[in-house]
């Protein structure tokens, strides 16, 4: 994929209006969708697609952007794959902006622009799944805003800055101004603390990732207790297990936080194996 493979509003395109509000203000949402191997390349059959659409719908309701129907997006993704003959697996990035308008923050028209972009599957080292990754704790803080919490809006400067400063570490964990650990630059966080599986509460800050939601449902189905609550840095350092997750990579165990080593523990392995049974990662 040396050239940009893109659809805009359901048709092949290589240009976007310079007046698009996504470009000017980050006025929009996005979903990064892992398209793996399923019959007929039918996006509706993907286990996480429903989670992606529900988060997109919630984001549209929060921002007041018209949300395309689930059926329309499924048809366009199928057409996208057919038109470009994309290999499997591949990554589809779905971007929804408020469309084009003149100067000024206040929205004028009740419109939206749909963008699909295809990317090759990332070539992560296999040891990230088996041996784990190293993580640092970023000095870039996340802002608390309950109106934007949970949704995947286009404003990602905090993550850009944190990722650019993580050096030789494989991922950077980010905290809010209270010192609570929230998430990674591209992942959600789970930790076993005092023999209890925990994940940060994301009601006022952070992204409610589709894999995080899937793992919470999986834990409920499998009878694995899990708690959503605040996790402070000192608590995280004392954790017996830590793993990060997202919809593309599945689960990565954490083998080191700053200079503190960790083992890949039984809870991490159990959940990773359960996900492999249901979603090929």
Image: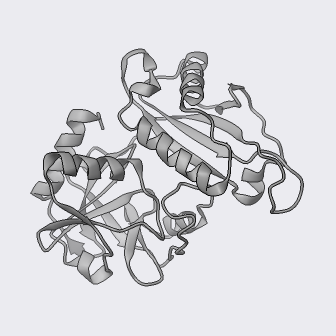
The structure residue drawn at horizontal position 56% and vertical position 40%, both measured from the top left corner, is 93
Figure check: 65 above or below 46: below
The structure residue drawn at horizontal position 74% and vertical position 59%, both measured from the top left corner, is 25
Figure check: 141 above or below 64: below
Quadrant in the picture for residue 1: top right
The structure residue drawn at horizontal position 48% and vertical position 60%, both measured from the top left corner, is 150
In this view of the protein, which residue sits in the foreground, 167 or 96?
A: 96
Task: Check the image and tell me how it is coloured.
Answer: one colour
Q: Is residue 145 visible?
A: yes
Give the left or right position of residue 118, taking residue 180 as reference. Answer: right
In this view of the protein, which residue sits in the foreground, 88 or 188?
A: 188
Quadrant in the picture for residue 132: bottom left
Residue 222: % across, % down: 15, 46
Quadrant in the picture for residue 62: bottom right
Figure check: 272 above or below 138: above
Residue 166: % across, % down: 45, 68
């Amino acid at each position: 994929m040396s050239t940009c493979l893109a659809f805009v509003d359901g048709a092949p395109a290589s240009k976007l209006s310079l007046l698009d509000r996504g470009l000017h203000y980050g006025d929009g949402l996005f979903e990064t969708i892992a398209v793996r191997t399923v019959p007929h390349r039918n996006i509706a059959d993907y286990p996480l697609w429903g989670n992606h659409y529900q988060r997109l719908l919630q984001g549209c309701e929060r921002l007041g952007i018209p949300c395309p129907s689930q059926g329309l997006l499924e048809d366009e993704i199928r057409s996208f794959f057919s038109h470009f003959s994309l290999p499997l697996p591949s990554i589809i990035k779905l971007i929804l902006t408020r469309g084009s308008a003149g100067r000024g923050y206040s929205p004028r028209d009740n419109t939206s622009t749909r963008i699909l972009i295809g990317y090759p599957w990332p070539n992560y080292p296999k040891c990230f799944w088996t041996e784990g990754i190293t993580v640092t704790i970023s000095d870039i803080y996340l802002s608390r805003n309950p109106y934007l919490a949970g949704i995947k809006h286009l404003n990602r400067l905090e993550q850009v800055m944190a990722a650019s400063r993580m050096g030789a570490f494989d991922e950077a964990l980010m905290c809010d101004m209270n010192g609570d650990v929230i998430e990674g630059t591209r992942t959600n966080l789970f930790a076993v603390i005092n023999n209890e599986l925990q994940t940060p509460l994301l009601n006022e800050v952070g992204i409610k990732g589709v894999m995080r939601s899937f793992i919470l449902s999986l834990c409920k189905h499998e009878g694995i207790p899990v708690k959503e609550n605040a996790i402070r840095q000192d608590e995280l350092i004392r954790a017996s297990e830590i793993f990060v997750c997202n919809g593309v990579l599945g689960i990565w165990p954490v083998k080191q936080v700053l200079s503190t080593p960790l083992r890949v523990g039984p809870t991490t392995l159990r959940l990773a194996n359960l996900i492999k049974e249901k979603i090929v990662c």
